[in-house]
Amino acid sequence: MLCATLKKQMKFLEQQQDETKQAREEARRLRSKMQTMERIELLLKSQRPEVEEMIRDMGAGQAAVEQLAVYCVSLKKEYENLKEARKASGELADKLKKDLFSSKSKLQVVYAELDQAKLELRSAQKDLQGADKEIASLRKKLKMLQETLSLPPGDSEAVNRLVLESPAPVEMLSLKLRRPAFSDDIDLNATFDVDTPPARPPGLQRGPAKKLCLEKARAPTQDGPGKLPKGSTQVRTGFDGLGGRTKFIQPTDTTLIRPLPVKPKAKAKAKQKVGARTALPPSQALLWWANNANCS
C-alpha cells in the first residue's frame, strides 16, 4: 500500500519536472525571439553607424550567421511592405491629382456660367428699365387720350394735342398761333361743314400777298374751282398718337370744291372787301401757322 502511494508520487514529480523543463525551454526560446525582435526594431529605426556596431558585437560564429540571416529576411519583408505601401500611396496621389484637375475644370466652367448669368442679369435689368419707361410713357399717353375722350373739346385742346404728338423740336412746343394777317377771328372749333363761298369774278384778286411762301401755298386754289394740286392723294401717313405712324384717308378740303362760276347780274354784284377772308378750319389754321413759321 505504501509502495503504491510512493510510486504515484514519483510519477507525479517526474511529470512536474518534465513540464518545468518544457516551460524553461519555451521561456528561453521566447526570450531569444524577443531579443531578436528588439534588435530588428533597433536595426530598422537606427542609423547606419549603429547598425554596423551592432553587427560587430554579434561576432563571427554560427549563431551570428543565423542571426544575420534572420535580420536579412526581416529587412526584406519590411522593404516589400514599404514598397507596396509606397505604390498604394502613389496611386492614391495620382487619383487625388486627377480629382483636383477635374474639380478645377468644373470650377472654371461654373465661373464662366456665373459670368454669363451676370451679363444676362444686367441685360435683363436694362430691358426691364426700358420696358418700365415705355410702360410709363404709354400710361401717360393713354391717360391723355382718356382725358381727351372724356372731356368736351376746348378751344385749344386739339391744337395742344397736335403740338404734343408732332415731331417738332422741343423749343417749338411752347409756341402759340398768331393771328392771321387778313382777319382778327380765330375759330379753332370750325369743322369741314362750312358753306360754299360765293363765286368771284376772274379778274378780282383776293388781296395783296404779304408772304411769298403763303402765296405759293395757296396758288393751287386760284387756278380754278375744279382743279386739284398735282400729286395729291387721299391716303396719308401720320402719327397715331402712341409713338408710331399709321395711314388714314384725308377728307377733301371743302374750300377746293367750288361750283361752276355763274355770271351774276349787274344789280346783284356784291362788292367784296379786299381784306376780307373766311374763317379757317382748325387744320387750315394750323397749316397757315406752319407756313408763317417757316417763312419767318
Image (cartoon, rainbow, N blue to C red):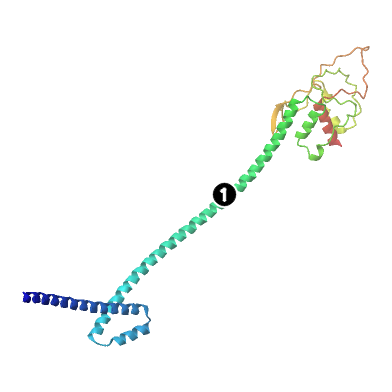
Residue ID at (34%, 79%): 42
Foreground: 81 or 3?
Answer: 3
Residue ID at (57%, 52%): 115
Where disc 1 sits, the SS reads: helix
How many callouts does the rendering have? 1
Which x, y percent locates residue 198? 86, 17
Residue ID at (70%, 37%): 137
Foreground: 6 or 189?
Answer: 6
Q: With 73 as the anchor, is 217 left or right in this view?
A: right
Which x, y percent locates residue 169? 78, 39
Q: Quadrant of residue 238?
A: top right
Foreground: 188 or 86?
Answer: 86
Q: With 286 as the anchor, is 142 left or right in this view?
A: left
Question: Looking at the picture, does residue 105 appear above or below residue 259?
Answer: below
Which x, y percent locates residue 218? 83, 28
Question: Looking at the picture, does residue 289 appear above or below residue 39?
Answer: above
Q: Quadrant of residue 286?
A: top right
Residue furthest front in the image: 2
Foreground: 186 or 130?
Answer: 130
Quarter of the rendering occupied by the C terminus = top right
**Residue assigned mark 1:** 117
